[in-house]
Image (cartoon, grey):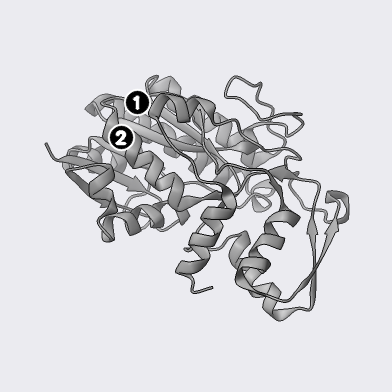
Amino acid sequence: MIKNILITGAEGQLGSEIQALVMNQKALRLLAGGQYHFTDQSTLDITDAEAVYTYMQQYKIDYCINCAAYTAVDKAEEQEELAQLVNVEGPRNLAKAAAALGAKLVHISTDYVYAGIASGPIRETAATDPQGVYGRTKLAGEQAVLAELPDALIIRTAWVYSSFGHNFVKTMLRLGQERPSLSVVADQIGSPTFAGDLAEAILRILGQEESPSGLYHYSNEGVASWYDFAHAIFELAQIDCALQPIDTKDYPTPAKRPAFSLLHKGKIKNDFALAIPHWRESLARMLKTLRY
């Protein structure tokens, strides 16, 4: 049976990677019989509850993968109302429409819901304590989704990059070729997440489970600092740029970053039989798509 799948925020990193899977027909292997509907703000404003319901009803949506979000972490400190609208009211509207129409919702969240002070990999049961507007609105978005649709699937991820859009990898590639040296924060710890891997994981989950639900973590395997990540980018791309490790205090930003964002992935791996690649392996694959 053909399933109608709505992807919001389709021009972002994750949405673009899902589009790439559909274009190269990998999506067929992961989720057979899917009819994909890709939207961005210009084609579906998720903050408009009536528009969301009308769209999902018109196209008989079975699954909605919400990739839309306000992700400008620093700007959010000054644009809290806009972040609230996109990160809370938008997901609420999608969940409400999904509940009314019998659709399944996959909602993407973030490591910023945690304080970033853990001493080991963070499990889904860990206490939340967001430190800025972005994290607070993303956590409120999760809560809004679950209030409307308790059986939604929520995936928290971290350090996302892609061959599409703006991200840390592309910034390092550009700056590494423009400057002889760079200073990169070395005391923030986590694991990079290739959006292409997350896209495959989501479609694989939807393809094997009739109604997956619950809260899960997903990032690539392995541990790194931003300095480690930058070092690997330059090494794999063969860019000759000297790197200097610095502390977070030496690179102040309007929004506080979590010092420790390493997510525990045991639950998602066990429940859905997922094999998650190491971050260096995924980085190498992504750089090849950019011809490095």
First of labels 2, 1 by sequence position: 2
Residue behind mark 2: 206
Apparent side of residue 180 relative to residue 97 in the rendered image (left or right)? right
43 vs 32: above or below: below
Out of 285 and 123, give the one closest to the viewer. 285
Residue behind mark 1: 212
Say which residue appears at 34% left-offset and 59% top-offset: 20
Residue 155 seen in the current view: yes
24 vs 214: above or below: below
Quadrant location of the C terminus in the rendered image: bottom right
Quadrant location of the N terminus in the rendered image: top left
Apparent side of residue 228 relative to residue 64 in the rendered image (left or right)? right
CA–CA distance in space, label 2 to label 1 = 7 Å
Residue 161 seen in the current view: no
Q: Position of residue 36 (x, y in %)?
A: 24, 49
Q: Amino acid at mark 2?
A: Leu
Q: Position of residue 109 (x, y in %)?
A: 52, 37
- Based on the displayed image, in which of its 4 quarters is residue 91 positioned? top left
Q: Amino acid at mark 1?
A: Pro
Classify 10 Å Cα crowding around label 1: few (below 14), some (14-19), many (20 and above).
some
